[in-house]
Amino acid sequence: MIRSTAVLMAGAMLAACGSTSSEPEATMNNTVDLRHLVETEVAGNGIERYPLEGVEIPTPSDAQSRYEVLRQRRTAGGTIIAILRQQRGNRFVYARTELDCERNLFHVVGVADTRAHVETNVAHDGPLRSTDGLPLRQELSRFICARASA
């Protein structure tokens, strides 16, 4: 009886972690709004246990926020996974993104209030898609792809 209760509780916790109801950043068309992500409940309140410094990304399309790339790596499939940090005022949020530099494709695969959680949280942003008409994603992609080819 105790074992089955523990299994049920673990299943409920896993279901809650993957639930889209706790992810207000995901919109009806399955995209994460990176520009306003720092304004959502996902963002941290400015209290970081271990502040991280990355390389600042110039983003003229969003001068209110500071974007940094903390880490990036190439996958076996040739895409790039990049961990980004957005800060506006005393709020911050992390995003795990995937980019296909050759085809100018981008999507968000995780968002969280800490660097550690962004590695496992899922954002349900859909498949890799074009950055056309999305200036912020174009700026982020250009910078990350340029670093990857250097």
Image (cartoon, rainbow, N blue to C red):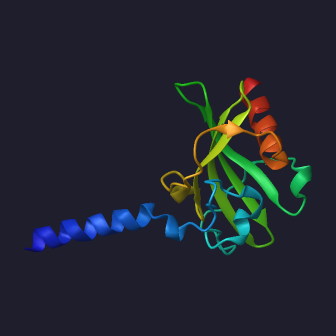
Q: Is residue 101 above or below residue 14?
A: above
Q: Position of residue 136 (x, y in %)?
A: 82, 49
Residue at 44 percent across and 60 percent down: it is 18
Q: Quadrant of the N terminus?
A: bottom left
Q: Is 108 placed left or right of 87 in the picture?
A: left
Q: Is 18 placed left or right of 93 in the picture?
A: left
Q: Nearer the viewer, residue 30 or 107?
A: 30
Q: Nearer the viewer, residue 45 or 53?
A: 45
Q: Position of residue 121 (x, y in %)?
A: 50, 56
Q: Quadrant of residue 38?
A: bottom right
Residue at 72 percent across and 46 percent down: it is 69
Q: Nearer the viewer, residue 88 or 34?
A: 34
Q: Position of residue 64 (x, y in %)?
A: 88, 63
Q: Is 72 placed left or right of 58 in the picture?
A: left
Residue at 61 percent across and 34 percent down: it is 73
Q: Quadrant of residue 86?
A: bottom right
Q: Nearer the viewer, residue 115 or 50?
A: 115
